[in-house]
């Protein structure tokens, strides 16, 4: 399919980044679908050139998906006497990658219906989030990214010797995990494939991190709370301004993680959470993932400050209550300088 593109129509698209992006996408697609056919490549060659650079296809060995004749034909364009001759075909793979990134960005756009206008459904392609962070992305995607960024940062800061990958599954309501095959005591290599994997839900950021529950002490060791569901408690507990939860606790020993489910947690909030929006993008405190590909559509202009809490966790509710009482009293005495 060839897209019709008006020439020199900057005046029509200069006011809108969306229109500019559509123009760029259509131009690249026209080149990939029609322009590069002037080289005389067959379908298999074009498919591979859109995936990999011409230099790689001309020199790769047994893994090359092209026949010898197809490879030699591409090599003809890559063995000239100057740089531009040798790298002219790189524009095909570059344009293909540009198309993939633009489409990936558009895929993240939120397409929702709203029946706020005269009772009629109105289709809105772009949704603005006034609290910052994402423009035109779904709520699930926003909290998926926030949860992954802040959870991965927690493990870097609190358990830096543990090799772990944190993922977020928007379609799951439960956490899951995979242990590393061996720990530090068993010929452990941090840079190897011996990694733990922890998969959270998008609600972790809001229900755990912003409530100040991410960090706790369990069995005398620093532990990570992966999930927290509030539970009803007696008036006695409520009168002490304590919140009660059933949580999933992730522990770590010798570089290998483990999860204990349905543990009681009591928390006293000494300072509420805060979200401070600032003027410029990339001025917030969201720990950015590595690589530009992860930053597509990301606007980081909010400083997220979780609540400050005193908490205790235990498989026995009464024990958690007793420990909580002692910790609250200790913090009050410390604040008074006693």
Image (spheres, rainbow, N blue to C red):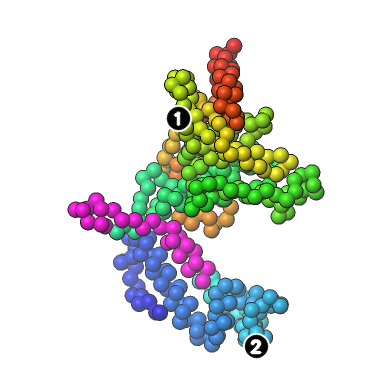
Residue at position x 51%, y 71% from top? 96
Residue 12's image quarter?
bottom left
Q: Residue 138, position in %: x, y? A: 41, 53
Q: Which of marks 2 and 1 is in front?
A: 1
Disc on res. 232: 1
The label on residue 69 is: 2
Residue placed at 35% from the left, 53% from the top? 127
Q: Which residue is drawn at 66% across and 77% down?
A: 64
Q: Is residue 101 magenta?
A: yes
Where residue 303 is drawn, which disc sits there?
Answer: none
Q: Is mark 2 on a helix, strand or loop?
A: helix
Against 213, residue 138 (above or below) is below
Q: In this view, does 58 lie above or below 204?
A: below
Q: What stretch is highlighted in magenta?
A: 96-122
Query: In the image, is 6 to the left or to the right of 159?
Result: left
Q: Which percent across, then down, holds residue 219?
A: 67, 30
Crowding at label 1, few (<14), some or many (≥20) Cα neighbours within 10 Å?
few
**Distance of mark 2 from mark 1, alpha carbons?**
72 Å
Q: Is residue 223 highlighted in magenta?
A: no
Q: Nearer the viewer, residue 96 or 24?
A: 96
Q: Can you tell which quarter of the image residue 137 is in? A: bottom left
Task: Classify 112 as above or below 264.
Answer: below
* Image quarter hosting the N terminus: bottom left
Tell me the SS state at disc 1: loop
Residue 244 drawn at (x, y percent): 50, 29
x and y percent of residue 289 in the render? 56, 50
Looking at the image, can residue 214 be seen? Answer: no
Tally of numbered discs:
2
Q: Is residue 285 left or right of residue 78?
A: left
At x 37% / y 60%, what residue is drawn?
Answer: 17
**Whether label 2 touches label 1, CB < 8 Å:** no
């Amino acid at each position: 399919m060839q897209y019709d593109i008006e020439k020199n129509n900057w005046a029509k698209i200069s006011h809108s980044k969306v229109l500019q992006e559509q123009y760029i996408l259509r131009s690249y697609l026209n080149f990939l679908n029609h322009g590069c056919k002037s080289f005389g490549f067959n379908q298999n060659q074009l498919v591979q050139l859109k995936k990999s650079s011409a230099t790689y296809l001309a020199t790769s060995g047994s893994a090359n998906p092209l026949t010898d004749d197809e490879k030699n034909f591409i090599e003809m364009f890559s063995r000239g006497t100057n740089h531009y001759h040798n790298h002219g075909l790189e524009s095909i793979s570059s344009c293909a990658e540009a198309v993939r990134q633009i489409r990936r960005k558009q895929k993240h756009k939120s397409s929702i219906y709203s029946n706020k206008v005269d009772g009629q459904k109105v289709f809105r392609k772009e949704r603005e989030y006034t609290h910052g962070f994402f423009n035109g992305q779904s709520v699930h995607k926003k909290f998926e990214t926030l949860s992954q960024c802040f959870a991965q940062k927690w493990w870097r800061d609190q358990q830096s010797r543990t090799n772990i990958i944190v993922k977020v599954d928007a379609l799951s309501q439960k956490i899951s995990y995979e242990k590393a095959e061996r720990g530090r005591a068993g010929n452990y290599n941090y840079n190897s494939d011996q990694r733990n994997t922890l998969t959270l839900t998008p609600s972790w950021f809001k229900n755990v991190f912003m409530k100040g529950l991410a960090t706790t002490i369990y069995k005398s060791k620093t532990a990570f709370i992966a999930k927290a569901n509030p539970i009803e408690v007696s008036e006695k507990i409520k009168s002490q301004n304590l919140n009660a939860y059933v949580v999933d606790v992730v522990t770590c020993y010798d570089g290998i993680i483990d999860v204990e489910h349905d543990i009681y947690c009591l928390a006293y909030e000494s300072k509420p959470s805060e979200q401070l929006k600032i003027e410029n993008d990339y001025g917030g405190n969201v720990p950015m993932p590595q690589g530009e590909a992860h930053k597509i559509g990301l606007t980081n202009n909010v400083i997220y400050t979780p609540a400050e809490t005193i908490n205790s966790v235990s498989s026995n509710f009464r024990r958690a209550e007793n420990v909580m009482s002692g910790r609250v009293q200790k913090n009050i005495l410390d604040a008074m300088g006693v």
